């Protein structure tokens, strides 16, 4: 029986041609493109978290010095966190242009606000009896911080890192507006060209990346706080 | 800082606000979509949270849904909904559904937590007074859970105003499209004006609802105990940006 196919022979029949949502051939043929997008996504994630940690940790220590500093820092953190990401990208834009720096700076600021709160909450939660005991056996302020307070604040610190990491992975996609959204670029392009396989693959990869980051940081917390084994995270 | 002055003069210029693509129409559209999405999410999440909290079932779901909501990019869901066949597509129901999905987690988690943290002694006393389950829910548990419910509402509201901006990436609606159109045409004042307006809206919603929270939450039923709960609250009490 003759099947009427236009240009039979010149057009292959596969999931790419049929524009299907689930298409293993897409992953096979565009793996280098996917890897490049994933790489940018990871770059943004690592740099944003690094900014958040490097700036956020000292800021949290500063905030704990006096009540008014604390309300100032935490208030500013809430203020920044309220600004929608698309707006934040654009407010950094005049200085950094259409570069990956724009995305990193904006998302670094979000991570910063989450991490500051996490560190402050963690340090506030250290029982004062433990601090007194450490002082009593002769710990100076520096040793008290690094050997007693920080280890006990680690679960809260890493909990905030997990929140920041997972949100950063999701929000990076919006960086597509300045052409540096990692997997978000593929979403943006896939929307224009109605390329279903590209949209679904990029979406699934983003979610998987977020969960992977979450699990990795959870494993890090388990490794760093062996005395809490057996306690639910 | 000349770009800031340019965008401020763009903001005060009456002609920027008029017309179909003007700031006025876009702001109304933005707030309309956000409000509708929040309403849909509240109608689903609050009764569900009250019921789950009252019966004490589905705790894992109510807690974990926040983590899942954070991991899924709003942008991805919006793109998928726009590309799906009818009744999806670039239309209001698609956008409202997508935005409502992301407003459910903070509402559900906080309503559930609020219900679970109601003092058991109060519930026992109500039962001892002969209250039925519905009466107990409406007159004892719900009033005591209201402070946390309001926290959930504030977080969801601020978040939905923020995520509505993302609709501008997939369509020519909301203040987000003022930003994306400005980026595409390198119209800096328009871009920054849109961004400032959206940021101001989000802050306004945060401030108004925080004030409302303080008025409603006079009798707090929250008794934070222990590190574990504090770590959980970190996630639960911050308004997430979208």
Image (cartoon, grey):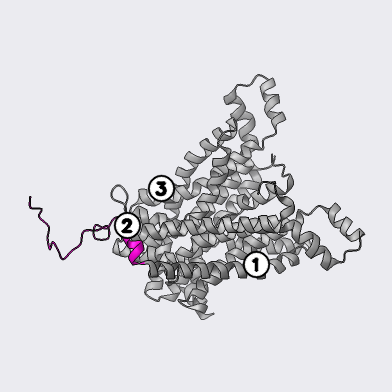
Residue at the left extreme, as displayed: A1
Q: Are marks 1 and 3 on the same chain?
A: no
Is disc 3 on the same chain as disc 2?
no
Residue drawn at (51%, 55%), measured in percent from left and top? B71
Mark 3: few, some, or many residues within 10 Å (few <14, many ≥20)? Answer: many
Q: Residues within 10 Å of mark 2 (few under 14, many from 20)?
A: some
The span shown in magenta is A1-30
Q: Local crowd at mark 1 within 10 Å, few (<14), some, or many (≥20)?
A: many
Q: Nearer the viewer, residue B49 or B35?
A: B49
Disc tally is 3
Sequence-first disc among 2 and 1:
2
Is residue A9 part of the magenta span, yes or no? yes
Badge 3 is on which residue?
B97
Q: Residue furthest front?
A: A1
* Relative depth, front residue between B185 and A27: A27
Q: Nearer the viewer, residue B110 or A34?
A: A34
Residue A23's tag is: 2
Tell me the CA gap for discs 1 and 3. Answer: 35 Å
From this viewpoint, is residue B128 visible?
Answer: yes
Q: Is residue B199 left or right of residue A59?
A: left
Mark 2 vs mark 3, foreground winner is 2
Whether the magenta-drawn stretch holds residue B88 is answered as no
Residue shown at the point (33%, 52%) measured from the top left: B91
Q: Position of residue A39 (x, y in %)?
A: 47, 69
**In this picture, residue A208 sits left or right of residue A9:** right
Q: Is residue A198 above or below residue A94?
A: above
Q: Of the numbered discs in the image, which one, if any, rests on residue A53?
A: 1
* Callout 1 secondary element: helix
Dividing the picture into quadrants, the one containing residue B158 is: bottom right
The residue lying furthest to the bottom in this view is: B2
């Amino acid at each position: 029986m003759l099947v009427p196919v236009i240009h039979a022979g010149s057009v292959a029949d596969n999931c790419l041609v049929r524009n299907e949502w689930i298409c293993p051939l897409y992953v096979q043929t565009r793996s280098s493109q996917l890897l490049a997008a994933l790489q940018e996504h990871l770059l943004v994630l690592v740099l944003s978290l690094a900014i958040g940690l490097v700036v956020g940790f000292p800021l949290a220590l500063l905030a704990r010095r006096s009540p008014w500093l604390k309300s100032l820092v935490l208030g500013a953190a809430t203020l920044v966190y309220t600004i929608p990401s698309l707006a934040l990208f654009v407010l950094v834009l005049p200085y950094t242009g259409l570069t990956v720096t724009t995305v990193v700076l904006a998302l670094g600021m979000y991570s910063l606000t989450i991490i500051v709160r996490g560190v402050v909450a963690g340090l506030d939660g250290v029982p004062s009896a433990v601090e007194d005991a450490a002082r009593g056996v002769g710990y100076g302020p520096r040793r008290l911080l690094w050997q007693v307070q920080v280890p006990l604040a680690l679960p809260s610190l890493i909990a905030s890192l997990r929140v920041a990491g997972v949100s950063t992975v999701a929000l990076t996609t919006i960086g597509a507006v300045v052409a540096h959204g990692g997997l978000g670029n593929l979403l943006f392009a896939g929307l224009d060209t109605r390329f279903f396989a590209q949209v679904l693959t990029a979406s699934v990869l983003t979610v998987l990346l977020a969960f992977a980051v979450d699990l990795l940081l959870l494993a890090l917390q388990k490794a760093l706080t062996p005395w809490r084994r057996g306690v639910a995270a | 800082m000349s770009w800031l002055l340019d965008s401020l003069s763009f903001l005060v210029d009456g002609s920027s606000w008029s017309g179909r693509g003007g700031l006025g129409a876009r702001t109304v559209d933005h707030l309309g979509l956000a409000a509708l999405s929040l309403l849909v999410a509240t109608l689903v999440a609050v009764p569900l949270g009250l019921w789950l909290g009252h019966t004490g079932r589905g705790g894992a779901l109510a807690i974990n849904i926040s983590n899942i909501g954070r991991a899924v990019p709003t942008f991805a869901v919006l793109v998928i909904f726009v590309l799906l066949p009818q009744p999806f597509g670039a239309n209001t129901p698609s956008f409202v559904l997508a935005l409502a999905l992301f407003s459910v987690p903070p509402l559900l988690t906080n309503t559930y937590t609020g219900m679970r943290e109601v003092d058991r002694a109060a519930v026992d006393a109500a039962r001892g007074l002969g209250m039925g389950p519905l009466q107990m829910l409406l007159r004892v548990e719900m009033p005591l859970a209201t402070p946390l419910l309001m926290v959930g509402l504030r977080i969801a509201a601020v978040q939905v105003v923020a995520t509505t901006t993302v609709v501008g990436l997939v369509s020519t609606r909301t203040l987000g499209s003022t930003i994306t159109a400005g980026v595409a045409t390198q119209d800096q004042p328009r871009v920054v004006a849109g961004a400032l307006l959206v940021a101001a809206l989000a802050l306004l919603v945060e401030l108004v609802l925080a004030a409302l929270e303080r008025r409603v939450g006079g009798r707090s039923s929250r008794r934070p105990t222990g590190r574990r709960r504090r770590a959980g609250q970190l996630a639960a009490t911050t308004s997430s940006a979208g």
